[in-house]
Image (cartoon, helix red, strand yellow):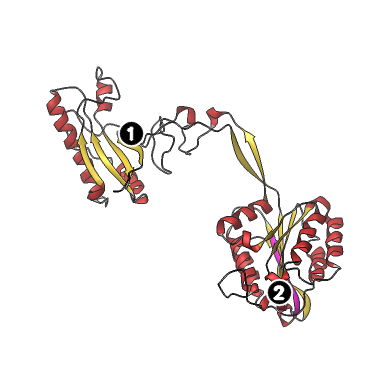
Amino acid sequence: MLKRKLIPALSIATLTLSSLAVAAPAEKTVLTKKTDTLFVILDSSSSKNATFDGDSSESTVFDIEKQLLQRINKNIPSKLKLSSGIRTFGFGSCVNWSNTQLVKEISPHSATDFQSGIDKASCAGGGSPLESALKSSATDLSNSTGNIALLVVSDAYKVSNKTLAEAAALEKQFGNRLCIYSVWVGNKNEQPGKFILQELSNISGCGQSVDISTVTSNKATASFVEAMLYNKTTVKVKAKTLDDDNDGVINSADKCPTTPKKAQVNEKGCWAYGGVIFNHGKSSIKKGYEALFSNATEMLKANPALIVEIQGHSDSTGPAKFNKFLSELRAKAIKAVLAKNGIESSRLTTKGFGESAPIATNDTAAGREINRRVELKASYK
C-alpha cells in the first residue's frame, strides 16, 4: 500500500495552497564576488596518457582533467563579470614544441571561448615543466586587474624543485591579489604530488587544494567553483523581511510558506486565483479565467506525482442539502477544466462540503462571494 505524504491545499478563488507554518531563519548566506580573473594551468605531460585508475571509465588522466574543466566551465555563472585564460605544460607537438603553451589568452569569460581553449589542449606528451607554466603565467597575468584565482590541474608528480620558487615569485608579484587553487588528478603511484599542490596554496596564503575524487559530481564541482569565485558570508536578517518561498509575501504574513515556484498567490501567500468564479446558486465557471487555470495546469504538470481532491464550497444562502449538492457540482466543474487541460482524471477526485467550512462571514455579500469557492487538497502518490 502506498503511503501518501500530505502537502498543502490548493484553492480556487480562491485556489490556495496552505501548510503548517515554518519558523523563519535568523540568518541567510550572502555571496559576494571575490575573483576578477580565473587562470588555469593544465598538465598535458606524457603521464596524462595513462589510464586513470580512480574509476572504471578507462579514460586517460588527460580526459579526466578536461572533463573537470568542462564541469567548471558549466558552473561559472554566465552573468558574472570575469576574465579567464588557460595555459598548458608538457613538451613536444602538444605544446607547440615548447614547455608550455597559452591555449586561451586572458579575455572576458564566455563559456564558448573557454571550451575552445579546452579543445585546443588536444594531446599530452613530454615531461612536467610546471615551473615553466608558472613563470609564463606571470607575463600572462601582468595586465590583469583585481583579484586572481590561479587554478593548477595536475598530478604535480616529479615536477622540478623550481616549481615552488616560481610560485613564490608569483606571490611576490601579485601579493594578496593572488590565490592559488589546485585539483590533483593522477594515479595512485603519483600521490606524492598532492603535497606540492598543497604547498602552492600555502605559498599564496589562500586558495584550496583538493583531490579529483572530491569534485567528480556536478554539485561538488559547483561548490569548488563557488569557493574560487565568491566570498560566502552569513548575515543576520530580520524575520519580517524574509520570503523563503520567493512568492513576494514575507514569512510573517505568509499563510502558505511552501508555495510552488511561479504559482500565482494572493495577499496571504497562498496559491490562489483572485476574484469570484461562481455566481450565487451556480456551478458554471464564468469566462475570463483561462489564464488563471493555465497557471494551475502548469503547476500540476510540473509535479506529476501530485494527486488532488477537489473540494467544493458554498455560502450559507439556501437549504444546506442543496448547498452541498451545488458545491459538488462546482468541484466537478473545476475537475472538467483541469482534465480538459491535460491533467489525468485519475489524479483528480471531487467532494462537496456545502456551507460547512466558510472562510469569510456569510453576513455580507463580499463574504459570501469568497465562500463560493473550490479548494484542492493535494498529496503525493
- In the picture of the structure, the residue carrying the numbered disc 1 is 274
Q: In the image, is 79 to the left or to the right of 100?
A: left
Disc 1 is placed on an element classified as loop
- Asked if residue 4 is positioned above or below residue 50 in the image, the reply reads above
Residue for point 52% across, 32% down: 24
Q: In the image, is 373 to the left or to the right of 202?
A: left
Quick check: can you spot residue 110? no
Classed neighbour count for the residue bearing mark 2: other residues with Cα under 10 Å, few (<14), some (14–19), many (≥20): many
Residue 88 within the magenta-colored segment of the rendering? yes
- In the picture of the structure, the residue carrying the numbered disc 2 is 44
Q: Nearer the viewer, residue 304 or 248?
A: 304
Quick check: can you spot residue 233? yes
Q: Looking at numbered disc 1 in the image, what kind of residue is underneath it?
A: Gly
Disc 2 is placed on an element classified as loop
Q: Looking at numbered disc 2 in the image, what kind of residue is underneath it?
A: Ser
Q: Which residues make up the magenta segment?
A: 84-91
Measured as percent of width and height from the top left, residue 121 is found at: 67, 74
- Asked if residue 151 is positioned above or below residue 102 in the image, the reply reads above
